[in-house]
Amino acid sequence: MNAITSEPGVVELTREEGRRMLDERTRRMLGMTLEEFEAAYDGGTLDLERPEVEHLITLLPFAR
């Protein structure tokens, strides 16, 4: 099962759906918007030792 639909299989997201998903997670996990997270990532100011940051970085391809 996947967490999005509770159905087995793969779910494809549009870029906009990926951005919404990642924005929700960055707000919940770090208290910042996706745009703030992307700016901090691109600027090299994120604490890469934080597991939450590592997790969110792996999801960036869904938003870009």
Image: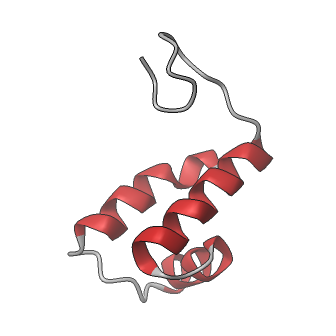
> Left or right: 13 with respect to 1?
right
> In the picture, residue 14 is in which quadrant?
top right
Does residue 38 lie above or below 51 as drawn?
below
> Left or right: 44 with respect to 39?
left
The percent coordinates of residue 12 (x first, y second) are 66, 25
Is residue 58 among what the camera can see?
A: yes
> In the picture, residue 56 is in which quadrant?
bottom left
The percent coordinates of residue 44 (x first, y second) are 44, 84
Is residue 64 among what the camera can see?
A: no
Q: Residue shown at 41%/70% (left/top)?
A: 29
Q: Residue shown at 54%/55% (left/top)?
A: 60
Q: Residue shown at 57%/24% (left/top)?
A: 5
Does residue 61 lie above or below 54 as drawn?
above
Does residue 4 lie above or below 58 as drawn?
above
Q: Looking at the picture, tell me which residue is in the foreground, 6 or 63.
A: 6
The quadrant of the picture occupied by the C terminus is: bottom right
